[in-house]
Image: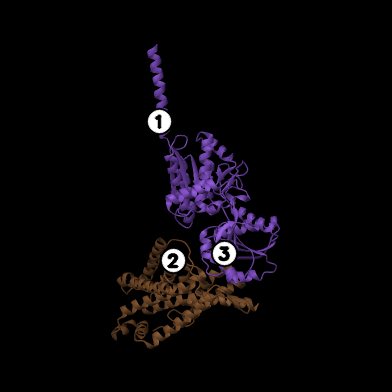
Amino acid sequence: MLAQLLQFSFSGLTVGATYALAALGFTLIYNASHVINFAQGEFIMIGGMLAVFLVGLGVPLPFAIVLAVAVAALVGVLMEKLAIEPVGRGDTLALVIVTIGVSLVLRGAVQVWLGKGSHALPSFSGDAPILIGGAALMPQSLWVLATSAAVVVALAWFFERTLAGKAMLATAINRTAAELVGIDTDRVLRVSFALSAALGALGGILITPITLTSFDVGIMLGLKGFAAAVVGGLGSGLGAIVGGLLVGLIEAFCAGWLSSSYKDAVPFVLILFILFFLPSGLFGPKTTERV
Amino acid sequence: MRGVFKTLVGGIVLAAGIAQAALAVEPIKVGSVLSVTGAAAYLGDPELKTLQMYVKKLNAEGGLLGRPLELVHYDDGSDANKANAFAKRLVDDDKVDFIVGGTTTGSTMSMVPIVEKAGVPFMSLAGAVVVVEPVKKWVFKASTTDRIAAERVLYDMKQRGITKIALLSDTSGFGQSGRTQTLSVLAKYGVSLVADETFGTKDTDATPQLTKIRNAPGIQAIFVFGFGQGPALVTKNIRQLGIDLPVYHAHGVGSDEFIRIAGPAAEGVKALAPALMIADHLADGDPQKPVVSAYVKTYTDTWKEGVSMFGGQAHDNFFIVVDAIRRAGTTDKAKVREEIEKTSKWIGTGGEVNMSATDHMGFDLWGLRLLEVKNGVWVEAK
């Protein structure tokens, strides 16, 4: 029984960590622009697919990872420059629709370029599971969890201690005020796209040895990441992490104890509950209506 | 008198010539409705490519009964409603001689009433048994079904004394139909389920389900019914959890891609596949070797991509009719239908086909090969 419990927890935490990384990406861009970037899942896919492609070309894994993350960040910047900026900042809904369009383009481009097949990466430190209390934990899961933790710490440092980070926070709180004190909010927007693309790509690479990748993995990962972000409270970094882990864990326990058929419904049912009873999510900002 | 005779002969020769010329330009019309776009595109795309390729090839070799072939094709976009309308068009407007297609079971079943009413030989490429059970006069389907796959696996389990298994099926139509068929034939082989789980085709982790399966009392083997990357992931998870049970896959994974994705975890895994998928590894004396090798060569030379069992099914169904027309010596629909029904010991990419008035599919359990991964390649299981 305990072994079973542990096994579900390991499975849930690993999957949850990837949702958390995706949710963080949503959060970053939402904060900078109030846009929900539905191309976030494609960043995850691009990271994994590029890493596979580069490793296939004979590039050593560490370089392939760095390069794939860098290219994804560049794609993020280009997306902001070519698709988001021209629309202007007025209509958030129009921007959200643009991001859906971008995601279709990215998915299609990768499909044509790298094909429809599924791909795997070798695990970073072997395939021998670590047995803890009768449950198997994959070394790659540790990589995912540790990297997610490191990313959260790094982001916290970035927002608290650096000027660029503070500028992003200021933009998130009040864009007009941020512009009035001389913050280049367009640049902030570009940086946030680059960052969230890089985060997504990193997550995508880390999970590829566990989950495989193909041109269309971004759809589900993006949706689950979005669900995690909503559950945690859109705009909250801590919320994204907790939301991601929560969604992953509940999914795993649902598959294990209830029925695996309902697993994919979990995050979306969770969204409904959250929106009914806690409209701003677990850690979202408490909004007050101005009368 | 001689003059009259000459004119008469001349007239006859002329008439014969005209008749022959008319015959020569009258093509044999091959109708097809396939799902080349949409959800079932990965099935319909190689099917259409196969038909196009062989129509062209036959024409280059002088056609059939001295007449050229003409392919009239409509893409139903994986939509059964459209398939119905297109079938009507093939029968009424295009007046085709026979129809190959209906990529999915849905499309096929929506076309059936039309071909039955019009009386056109119809070769379906769909998977489910309902297409040929009960037998419909004009409907044939020389491709394997999920029930055969289930029976083939259960047969092997019985041979090895396995009686308690876990079934892990994917949530797609393929997996769920496979699950239903497996449940329907379990008792016949004295096998019982101790766990019945599912996984999504795009799932990234199946360890919770497998943990449950591992703890199921008395479990002796795992039967995975799925298609695409999901089963490869499941295979990885099985080995990660240290589960050391025999693993059987249905006929949705028998490709080199599976081994590439699953990596070392694939070792020792058993799966069903038509001989087509192990073309390179077939023994020289194998009766299917010539047809399979020829198909693989023609397809890869023409389209520069790997073969799939679906393209192979299009090949088999198309040539069964071509051979039936050859034997009948005419494209008269009733005679062609009779000849199709008489198809026997016909070797295709999917196995040996023996049709009869009561069996419009013609495959037995042995059309699918049971393969096993040994040292990173598929070989026939002993």
Return the residue at label 3: B266
Tag nearer the camera, 1 or 3: 3
Dot 1 crowding, Cα within 10 Å, few <14, some 14–19, many 20+: few
Q: Which mark is residue A56?
A: 2
Q: CA distance from mark 1 to mark 3?
A: 59 Å
**Are the residues tagged 1 and 2 within 8 Å (C-beta)?**
no
Residue B2 image offset from top left, x and y in percent: 39, 12
The quarter of the displayed image where residue B219 is located: bottom right
- Type of amino acid at the residue the image marks with label 3: Ala
Return the residue at label 1: B21
Residue A56 image offset from top left, x and y in percent: 44, 66
Up-down: is B146 above or below B361?
Answer: below
| Chain B, chosen colour in render | purple
Up-down: is B368 above or below B332?
Answer: below
Residue B105 image offset from top left, x and y in percent: 54, 52
Question: Are both tags, 1 and 2, on one chain?
Answer: no
Residue A209 image offset from top left, x and y in percent: 50, 71
Task: Name the residue at 46% across, 82% down.
Answer: A150
Tag nearer the camera, 1 or 2: 2
- Type of amino acid at the residue the image marks with label 2: Gly
Q: Secondary structure at mark 1?
A: helix
Relative horizontal placement of residue A279, taking residue A190 as reference (left or right): right
Query: Which of disc 3 and disc 1 is earlier in sequence?
Result: 1
Q: Which mark is residue B212?
A: none
Please state the chain letter of the residue tagged with numbered disc 1 in the rendered image: B
